Amino acid sequence: MALTLQKQQSISLAKTAGSSLTSISLGLGWDPVKAGGFLGKMFGGGAEIDLDASCILLNSDYQKIDLVWFRQLKSQDGSIKHSGDNRTGEGDGDDETINVDLQRLPASVKYLIFTVNSFTGQTFEKVEKAYCRIVNGSNNNELARFNLSDKGGHTGIVMASLTRENGDWEFKAIGTTTNGRTADDLITLAVQALR
């Protein structure tokens, strides 16, 4: 059974999975808040919400090596692939997924930081049931989940990080809110959240 993490909690992925991992995926899911009242029920609820999952690759000096997001769906070395932009949040399960081939990641990559932001500027007051989860790529077992429950006027969240440590990867739930609208806007805050 997957662990549900709180802010600032971390786990060893190898210990949680019971063996070293070769690939993982980070899934992001959310739903738009449903409008209340008679008219909301009659017309099907709230507006579409376009959230964007991104992955920032950093070296041991916290310098950006690469960025995988809706404008670049694959890392330059091909080790990280984004499922593509979901502009509504409708439906069950993960709305966006970032797949990471841990064996192909360059040795210079020490940190992967996963962020989510609202490119259109809609705030998280309009989002419900938001979560991120880490999945073993070999068998699709969910290893850990982090519920992004902070409601408010923010447009972005530094969700989580993966840190390379002695051949293993540590997954940390971060949950720092921000007002960035693209992954580029979140890089400085993401580095601060790691330190």
Image (cartoon, rainbow, N blue to C red):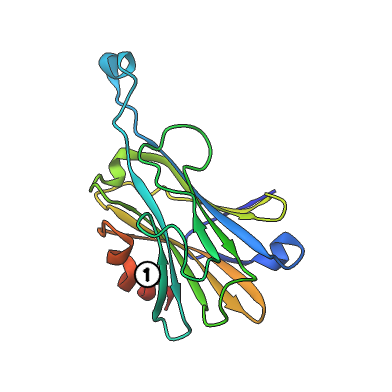
Amino acid type of the residue tagged 1 in the rendering: Ala
The total number of labels drawn is: 1
Residue 13 coordinates in the image, percent (x, y): 65, 65
Name the residue rendered at 58%, 56% in the picture.
25
- In this view, the residue in front, 191 or 101, is 101
Residue 182 appears at what percent x and percent y? Answer: 29, 59
Above or below for 193 versus 50: below
Nearer to us in this view, 80 or 188: 80
Screen quadrant of the C terminus = bottom left
Look at mark 1 in the image and give the residue it sits on: 190
Callout 1 secondary element: helix
Residue lying furthest right in this view?
18
Q: Residue at x 70, y 48 (%)?
A: 1
Frontmost residue, 132 versus 85? 85
Q: Up-down: is 183 above or below 62?
A: above
Place of residue 154 in the rendered image (x, y in percent of width and height, measured from the top left): 27, 53
Q: Nearer the viewer, residue 33 or 27?
A: 27
Locate residue 113, reporting x and y percent: 45, 67
The residue at 66%/56% (across/down) is 136
Say whether residue 53 is left or right of residue 37: right
At label 1, counting other C-alpha atoms closer than 10 Å, the crowd grade (few under 14, some 14-19, many 20 or more) is many
Residue under the point 49% across and 49% down = 83
Give the side of residue 6 with respect to residue 65, left or right: right
